[in-house]
Amino acid sequence: MYPIAAVVNDVAAVKLKITMNKENPEYAEKYEVTGSSASQLMQEFTTNFNNKMKFIFDKAGALDSLQKAIAPDSIINETHQAMAKQSTELKEYAKAEMNKSNNVALTMFMLGYYQSTANNPGFGLEPLGNDQVNAIIDKAIKDNPDHTGMAQLKQAIAAQSSGAAAQGGGGMWVGKQAPDFTLPDVNGKPLTLSSLKGKYVLVDFWASWCKPCRMENPNVVAAFNKFKNKNFTILGVSLDEDRESWLSAIKKDQLLWQHVSDLKQWESMVLPIYQFDGIPYNVLVDPQGKVIAESLRGPALEAKLAEVLN
């Protein structure tokens, strides 16, 4: 069975009225909660959040149809922008609701709800960074000084960050030499990552069939256009299988940098080398070939590039 309603146990009695879905009785069609203001806010948050996610999924479906129909670039770009705008608005909505909350259980629920969704690479959202999470936790601790849950969560995040820093900071590859590889470019000629040494290189793992990748591409294009004259370039590494789909996506999304692929999808040689389990994924490599950041998405990509290139 799946959970059909979520409540905060903050009062002696929380009343639930649940209407089950007749076609799929494992799911609730709707539910009403009374007697607990925190539970009502929780229901409001999940309803609004899910409606915003539905918009993103609907646009992703429309985008797939447009791409298959070879629609004009202007319409495809407009759909990309609408999805990116909604993703940003959803993140800001979630942050605002967490900051408004004065109930620790509600805050922890909303934080977990957003982060677990955003950490799924298939959903196209940007997770909150540790600084943002800590700011939310600090407010909750200030509002509820006797509650130990948030303080323990903050300690766990700090321990996790310290562990990452001890290994080079920020991720699996940060502080290490970028593993080298050679793959065919769009003309079938071998291109080696290390041949780009001397520049900052964003190694961007993506695929034409990956909706979150296509949603993220406008951000990557904007970053490329802004920093391409500052000793920066991008190497696109595709997990495609169909050559025409790969080349078409490069053209449609206006990805004006070098691209490589062995067209083996999840059996590509780069997977066991870089050990990622979802796309979009990227690593930022400095001119000496060392990884200085990874998994940069949305505003985080431009911010990191501005930090190292300006």
Image (cartoon, grey):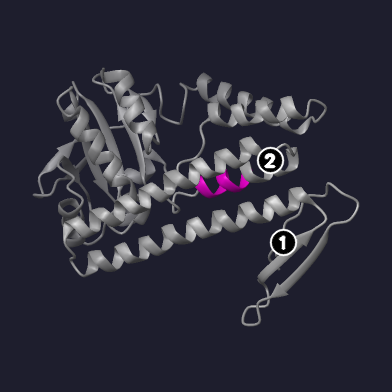
Nearest to the observer: residue 230 or residue 226: 226
Give the residue pinned by disc 2.
Answer: 108
Q: Which mark is residue 198?
A: none
Q: Residue furthest bottom?
A: 23
For residue 165, above or below residue 251: above
Quarter assignment of residue 98: top right
Residue kind at label 2, given as amino acid type: Met
| Left or right: residue 122 compared with residue 198 | right
Which quadrant does the C terminus fall into? top left
Which quadrant does the N terminus fall into? bottom right
User: Which stretch is magenta?
Assistant: 112-119
Q: Residue furthest right?
A: 12
For residue 72, above or below residue 197: below
At x 42% / y 50%, what residue is drawn? 86
Q: Taking the image as drawn, is residue 279 in sight?
A: no
At x 41% / y 41%, what residue is drawn? 275
**Secondary structure at numbered mark 1:** loop
- Residue 115 on the magenta segment: yes
At x 15% / y 53%, what residue is drawn? 251
Give the residue pinned by disc 1.
Answer: 5
Residue kind at label 1, given as amino acid type: Ala
At x 56% / y 43%, what residue is drawn? 94
| Left or right: residue 195 compared with residue 64 | left
